[in-house]
């Protein structure tokens, strides 16, 4: 897996691309495939709110649209007007997307304030009773 510090750097870069004219709350994500390729994502707001897309889903959808299906980790950063002040956890919809493509026992979710202050959780910890493909087997 790519070093955590590199994922944090890539997530911060992605945050700078966020389109947030309504909330001003920018989020960046860096998704790492099992082979070590990184896909960035940022949140993209919409005046109608419902079509807004989170950074995490942007990264996943970019990766999946390029044929990727195996992931090891995602780093998520965020803050008002691009200033990182606290941890930014994924919303429920993003956690459900992660459940579709990731092993909940091993997939790591890194929440960071900066390169020195971060926490790592498994998807299972973030979504303890998650519903995924195995539930339909």
Image: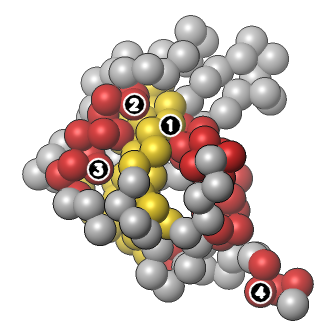
Residue 104 spot, x, y in % from top left: 55, 79
Mark 4 and mark 3: span between their CA atoms? 29 Å
Residue behind mark 3: 7
In the figure, 105 relative to 108: above or below? Answer: below
Residue behind mark 1: 41
Q: Specify few, some or many for label 4: CA neighbours under 10 Å numbering under 14, 14-19, or 20 or more.
A: few
Does label 1 or label 4 sit earlier along the sequence? 1
Mark 3 and mark 1 residues within 8 Å of each other at the beta carbon: no
Residue 42 spot, x, y in % from top left: 50, 31
Does label 4 or label 3 sit earlier along the sequence? 3
* Rendered image quadrant of residue 62: top right
One can see residue 100 in this view: yes
Does label 4 or label 2 sit earlier along the sequence? 2
Q: Return the residue nearer the eye: 127 or 59.
A: 59
Q: Secondary structure at mark 4?
A: helix
Q: Specify few, some or many for label 2: CA neighbours under 10 Å numbering under 14, 14-19, or 20 or more.
A: many
The residue depicted at 46 percent of the width and 45 percent of the height is: 39
Residue 6 spot, x, y in % from top left: 21, 49
Mark 2 and mark 1 residues within 8 Å of each other at the beta carbon: yes
The residue depicted at 45 percent of the width and 62 percent of the height is: 33
Mark 1 and mark 4: span between their CA atoms? 27 Å
Does label 2 or label 3 sit earlier along the sequence? 3
Does label 3 or label 1 sit earlier along the sequence? 3
Q: Specify few, some or many for label 1: CA neighbours under 10 Å numbering under 14, 14-19, or 20 or more.
A: many
Residue behind mark 2: 14
Specify the farthest residue to the bottom.
137
| Quadrant location, the N terminus | bottom left
Residue 134, disc: 4
């Amino acid at each position: 897996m790519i070093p955590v510090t590199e994922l944090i750097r890539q997530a911060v870069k992605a945050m700078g691309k966020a389109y947030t004219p309504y909330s001003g709350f920018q989020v960046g994500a860096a998704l790492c495939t099992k082979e070590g390729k990184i896909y960035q994502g940022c949140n993209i707001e919409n005046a109608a709110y419902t079509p807004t897309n989170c950074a995490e889903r942007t990264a996943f959808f970019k990766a999946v649209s390029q044929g990727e299906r195996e992931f090891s980790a995602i780093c998520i950063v965020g803050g008002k007007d691009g200033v990182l002040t606290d941890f930014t956890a994924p919303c429920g919809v993003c956690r459900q997307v992660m459940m579709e493509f990731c092993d909940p026992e091993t997939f790591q979710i890194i929440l960071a304030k900066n390169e020195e202050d971060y926490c790592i959780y498994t998807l299972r910890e973030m979504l303890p009773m998650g519903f995924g493909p195995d539930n339909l087997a």
